[in-house]
Amino acid sequence: MIYDVLIIGAGIIGKMVAHELSKYKLSVAVVDKKKEEDLNGNESLSKSIIHGNYTTSQELFTDRFSYNSRVIFENISKYVDFQYNPIGSFLIGKNPKENEKILKIYETAQKSYHKDIKLLEKKEIFSLQEELKDQNVQSGIYCTGTGTCSPILLSNYLLQSSKSNGIHYFFNSKVLSIEKYSDFYEVSTTNSQYKDFLCKIIINCSGYQGNTISEMVSDPYYNINYSEHKFIAMEPLKTTSTNSIILEIPSSIEKRFYISSANDKLRLFTGRDNLVVKKSIAETFINVGDTSVFGLTYSPIIASRILNLLEETNLNFIKKDL
Ligand SMILES: Cc1cc2nc3c(=O)[nH]c(=O)nc-3n(C[C@H](O)[C@H](O)[C@H](O)COP(=O)(O)OP(=O)(O)OC[C@H]3O[C@@H](n4cnc5c(N)ncnc54)[C@H](O)[C@@H]3O)c2cc1C
């Protein structure tokens, strides 16, 4: 059979996309090189953050992605228990220079339509988070939508639900090569039973190895280099006992996350933030890449963006009666 859509990669993004497509009368398959039981290694953290992500100085479209994603997560939480907990986050300023930055960030975020953030005065911050009194906080932004959740529970739901809506999953199926014919692709894998998959459209959700897959269709416009990212897990921060996520003003090259009871880890990372969700030179090959450390946060809105891109193709979109 020729599948309408083949998704390469069953990480959180591949499964979110599969779940979205499972609502339509389309034939969709997902291939992943891992065994099914090893899949949740991707979502290895027991708790992850649905980020506020409003701090970038330019008005990147990724900012809007994160607000819209937060709205979708809240909706999903009404019918799925994935331990979604919107605990909120504070971005705090501790001196006049940082206060000025806080104001600028707030103004930029307003332009990017973040409807869940508030600019707070000192008094309001302390009334919400008394523990911050010890930290010389002078100004702050509060994002009510920032939250934590269990990516494993979410992943399991997406997998089971999309399977029962008719999506075919093939594990142990590493993609080795892709051959493009005039109106379909032939995707060769290591699957012992169905080695070759035929499909009209490919969505590349293979994570940090995304460029390997992309190069199989000689896509010159897509190039990611994940080696620029550094992740350092550090000791828990002992000085606060807050319930929310507390963030410092980010500099241009690094962001520090102070997380207390939300996650018990202080993480520091540097890197780029250039989310890619676009068609390649071949209109029927869509790449998702550079999700950085925000892949979970972006996943619902990436899925709906992909749906929009697919609606521009000649696939027949008819909703299923579910
Ligand atoms: C330490 C750390 C903490 C993080 N914390 C957060 C957080 O709090 N909040 C947040 O929003 N994000 C967080 N992230 C980021 C988030 O985890 C990632 O952005 C997200 O998991 C990426 O998902 P993905 O589906 O794109 O990729 P992946 O999870 O990597 O999935 C890609 C899949 O493709 C498969 N694959 C690859 N190549 C092939 C091939 N040739 N053939 C078949 N299959 C293939 C792989 O087996 C894999 O299953 C964190 C990341 C790290 C590293």
Image (cartoon, grey):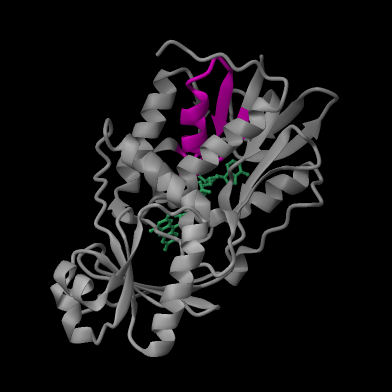
Q: Residue at coordinates 44% horizontally, 45% vertically from top-left?
A: 69
Q: Nearer the viewer, residue 170 or 89?
A: 89
Quarter assignment of residue 305: top right
In the figure, is residue 178 to the left or right of 86?
right
Q: Which residues are magenta?
A: 6-35
Is residue 291 among the parts visible in the rendering? no
Residue at (38, 25) in percent of width and height: 161
Residue 21 lies in the magenta stretch: yes
Q: Check residue 253 for magenta coloring.
A: no
Q: Is 276 placed above or below 279 here?
A: below
**Residue 277 horizontal/vertical position (percent):** 63, 46
Residue beneath the point at 52% across and 58% down: 111
Q: How many marks?
A: 0
Above or below, 82 relative to 316: below
Residue 39 x, y percent position in the rendering: 43, 43
- Looking at the image, which residue sits at the far top? 321
Q: Determine whether 234 is above or below 147 in the image.
A: below
Q: Position of residue 47 (x, y in %)?
A: 29, 55
Give the quadrant of the N terminus: top right
